[in-house]
Amino acid sequence: MASSIVNTLGAGSGIDITSLVSQLVDAQFAAKTGAINTQNRKVTAQISGVSQLKSSITDFATGLKSLATGGLLTTAPTSSNTAIVKATALPAAKLSGLAVTLEVQQLAQAQSVATAAAPSRSAGNGTGALTLTFGSGSVAAGSFVASSAAPINIAITAGNDSLDQIAATINAANAGVIASVITDSSGARLALKSQTGATQAFTLTATEDAGNPGLAALEIVQGKPGALFGTDAQDAIVAVDGIPVTRSSNSISDLVDGVKLDLVGAAPGTKVALGSTAPTEQLRSSINDLVAAFNSLHNVVKTQTDATSGALANDPNARALEQSLRRFPLTQLATPTIAGAPSTLSEIGISTNRDGTLSVNADQLTAALTKYPDAVEALFFNGTGATGGGAAAAFQAIADAATNTTYGLGANETRYTKLQSTLSDALDKANSDKEVIRARLTKQFSGSDARISAYKSTQSLLTQFFAPKTTN
């Protein structure tokens, strides 16, 4: 626009007005836009720094929590014969010194039975109702005794009386048995299986609709022709240190404190010893890994808070995080139950170097693992000290404070982002003001240039008018 005005009026002064105006305007706004851009670059670096610190500290806290709850750092139960009994630790179990002898005399099992072969798998097998009655004893042997629980009636109607549909109807009733259809040389059969336990024996009786019989062929009662009886419902019998106890399942969590038992096979007369093993080498390895990961985190914090080049050098929350990391090895993580047992990371050989990184005294760590293995374990798993959860909980408290959106780095991130938006608005306004002044100056200078051109024209006329006449 400015160039077209100049071209239209003519450059009477001989001055490049477009270039002159640009130089004047740029010079006028250079300091202001430069300051805004410089501050914007600083704020962008601060936002990036805060984001990096939040991500790094959150990742470390998550990794430490996974380490503490993954089961690798806790004393594990052992079984002398896993073909008979498998043992796993329950959450928060204290298994040091575990010594129990088991004898699996009988496994728990479900009642399983198949009805007499049906006339047809896909066609109707009669309508009416099937009734499940639960109790104990053997249906096949005639020793079944019904429990006091009310029988369960399952309606079988026209349209859902094929064998497959009957099985689906029984399963949909959630009656405590699983139904399926099996086939053999005699035809298709309705197979039923209960849950394990002595009280899960059952009978199946039928009430037929008068005009559509057939359900009675599916009854499961003593002496039913064609029915195939598999196993009887029974409890597991386990002798614990010689004392027999019963359970309805082969997966038992309330027999040995802190241990889940999975009974694999019955072996009357065979003793299985349960013991425990401390995770000494896993603890040693994990402690060294923790220190390496901590030092990586520390380097991120140190880079961002460096007094010369750090984007967060003057950020009080970043500095507070740095101080919290320095105090971490001194935090009480557990309450010792034995005099002299360690309760902090520093007491097992983890110390803070002058630059803020951590190092491990291998000899001190070995001594702690040898003399106080349970106490070292407690530092990482289910600690009961100031943090109530060991190292993972202690560091999570640091992470929560550092990333808090009210007073931590989270609040800083919000403040920096808002400032960045303000700077962007200021830069937009400065550029807008710049264009307004550019247009005004261009108009003013173009007017002056036009007047100069007019003066030159007048001068030329006057010069010609008053110039001496020459004669031939």
Image (tube, rainbow, N blue to C red):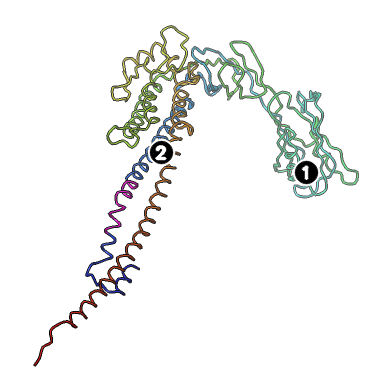
Query: Against 213, is 15 above or below?
Result: below
Q: Secondary structure at mark 2?
A: helix
Which numbered tag is attached to residue 118?
1
Task: Name the dominant secondary structure of the magenta segment.
Answer: helix
State the residue in front, 208 or 287. Answer: 287
Instruction: Say which residue label 2 marks.
Output: 51
Is residue 31 found inside the magenta-colored segment of the image?
yes
Q: Quadrant of the C terminus?
A: bottom left
Q: Amino acid at mark 1?
A: Ala
The residue range painted magenta reads 23-37
Residue 289 image point, x, y percent = 36, 27
Q: State which quadrant residue 169 falls in.
A: top right
Residue lying farthest right? Answer: 210
252 sits left or right of 138 in the view:
left
Q: Earlier in the sequence, mark 2 or mark 1?
A: 2
Q: Residue at x 29, y 56 (%)?
A: 26
Q: Amino acid at mark 2?
A: Ser
Q: State which quadrant residue 395 falls in.
A: top left
Is residue 251 found inside the magenta-colored segment of the image?
no
Residue 48 image point, x, y percent = 38, 41
